[in-house]
Image: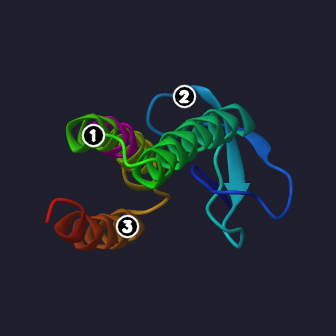
Amino acid sequence: MARHGSWWPIRGPVVSNCLECGAERLCYDQNMKHSHDPKERTALVVRLRKIRGQLQAVEKMVEAETDCAEVLTQVVSARRALKSFGDTLIRSHLHDCIEHAETQAESRKNLHALLTVLERYVA
């Protein structure tokens, strides 16, 4: 049976209707790794590339012995961008893997895994 969610599919997605709201969505085989819709995945990769660029700029600033306040300003910006990326993943996971899980047991399992990660995320 197909399920919502996913992160880089091994096999192609199938179109299915959401059990909760009836909306047509791309769903993935239960035996697949977690994968996102290709548009969502592309947006995530673009955000990560921007963050990588910010970090590379910080590295160059440190190598050039740029004023610490300027370096720290860029560090704050990169941290916010990374936090925003993480927040986006959390929202996606809540929607795809918990809210639209096939069974209540699967939803509980996914929620428990998310809570474990969130304990480290907010620390």
Residue 103, position as x, y percentages in the image: 43, 63
Q: Label 2 vs label 3: CA separation?
A: 22 Å
| Amino acid bearing label 1 | Asp
- The disc at residue 67 is 1
Q: Is residue 56 above or below residue 32?
A: above
Secondary structure, mark 3, is helix
**Could you say which disc has been placed on residue 104 in the image?**
none
- Mark 2–mark 1 CB contact (< 8 Å): no
The residue labelled by disc 3 is: 110
Tell me which label, 2 or 3, sits earlier in the chain.
2
Dot label at residue 22: 2
Residue at x 38% of width, y 45% of height: 82
The span picked out in magenta is 76-83
Q: Quadrant of residue 33?
A: bottom right
Distance from the alpha carbon under mark 1 to that under mark 3: 45 Å
Residue 14 locus on image (x, y percent): 79, 45
Which image quadrant is residue 31 in? bottom right
Q: Is residue 50 magenta?
A: no
The amino acid on which the numbered mark 3 sits, given as a three-letter code, is: Asn
Whole-percent x and y of residue 57?
Answer: 51, 42
Q: How is the image coloured?
A: rainbow
Structural distance between the alpha carbons of marks 2 and 1:
55 Å
In the rendered structure, which amino acid carries the disc numbered 2? Gly
Question: What is the secondary structure assignment of the residue under circle 2?
Answer: loop
2 or 1: tag closer to the N-terminus: 2
